[in-house]
Amino acid sequence: MPAVASADVDAEAQKQADLALKLRMDDQTRVLAVAYRLMTANAELCPSSKPTLGLSVTTIDGMPKPMRAAASRSLGLTAAPTVIWIPPDGAADKAGLKAGDRVVAVADWTVTPDSAGQRGIEQRLTNLGPGDVNLKVAGPEGERLTTLHPVMSCGYSIAIADLDEPNAAADGSHIVVNRGMLRFVKNDDELALIIAHELAHDSERHIRSKQANATAGLVAGGAVDVLFALGGINTQGAFMRAGQAAGAGFHSVEFEAEADYVGVYYMARAGYNTEGVEDFWRRIAAEHYNTIFVKNDHPTAPARYLSIARARTEIDAKRKAGTALTPERKKAGGPPADKPASATSAAETKAAA
């Protein structure tokens, strides 16, 4: 066998780690951008809304351990809280912040490059009060003061799981998207459909923690490779909790139908193209043909295809009539005719029981 020097192996390992980090950072940028757009456009419909600055901040310790060396080389991460993502046209972007800026101070509180500083900045950037936020940041040109004008957003975080299955999950507070789903969707409109569906699970309060199968979800949670929360919050193991809850949770057919219906509204309100987005379920059925015939705790793929198409037709009619794009809620005495039933009240009663 040809001899390979250990130094050459180490050098190649660094190159591959840098590529792996870039791939995951690109995935993160894509998911967070879609989620930010959905959550800010639908803040008024979310029961848990809060101000957001539109940025993600982390330190070297906030990265997964296998990625820390690559993050130091490629992103220049240290113990100092550093901006790693800013959505276009968000509060941070409008204030002129850039990825790579280090946060030096929040108002009159000075950030320290240690665990106490990390906890402090998470608290201050996540639990925002009314009014503007003053930040001092340091970049290539030195320190500068900026004023950010927060916008309202649905108060849920989102993470990426390094799992191959084209799936996503929600636990009432967090949304998790598998990297396999990013490879399966054709475009960001389909990705918006998936994230909006999970956002609807959270906003409609479908999720209630269960004990059965929780361990399996917890183990899957350990496979997270990239975990950055929307709006500059380190969720510190949120995906493991989300995986546990998702593994334990029971989603009824009615819950799933309602999440599909509300989710189409969410993506339409955020400006995503809904035309033909239901084709996602034909492709799922082609790959997983059992979804055509088997109905367990989810509707069949044909039912989901038709339900999403009808929701899209309803939205198009409202646009033509100049009517507000708000989902039709369940009325006393039964659900609206020809619409997926809203099961939120029943779900809460069942969960309480």
Image: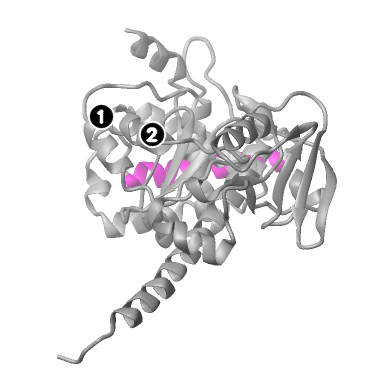
Between 33 and 229, the one lying in front of the other is: 229
- Amino acid type of the residue tagged 1 in the rendering: Ala
Where 28 falls versus 315 (above or below)? Answer: below
Where 341 falls versus 141 (above or below)? Answer: above
| Residue 103 image-quadrant placement | top right
Point out residue 3 in the picture as x, y percentages from the top left corner.
Answer: 21, 89
- Element at badge 1? helix
| Residue 176 image-quadrant placement | top left
Residue at x-position 46% and y-position 69%: 18
Tag 1 or tag 2, which sits nearer the N-term?
Answer: 1
Which circle marks residue 350 in the picture? none
- Amino acid type of the residue tagged 2 in the rendering: Ala
Instruction: Tell me where the magenta segment starts and ends, as one range.
Output: 301-320
**Residue picked out by circle 1:** 214
**Residue picked out by circle 2:** 242
Point out residue 249 in the picture as x, y percentages from the top left corner.
Answer: 31, 27
Residue at x-position 59% and y-position 24%: 48
Between 267 and 126, the one lying in front of the other is: 126
- Element at badge 2? helix
Disc 1: CA contacts within 10 A as few (<14), some (14-19) or many (>=20)? many
Type of colouring:
one colour
Point out residue 325 in the picture as x, y percentages from the top left corner.
Answer: 67, 35
Which residue sits furthest left?
A: 1
- Quadrant where the image shows the C terminus: top left
Residue 309 visible to the viewer? no
Label the magenta part by its dominant secondary structure. Answer: helix
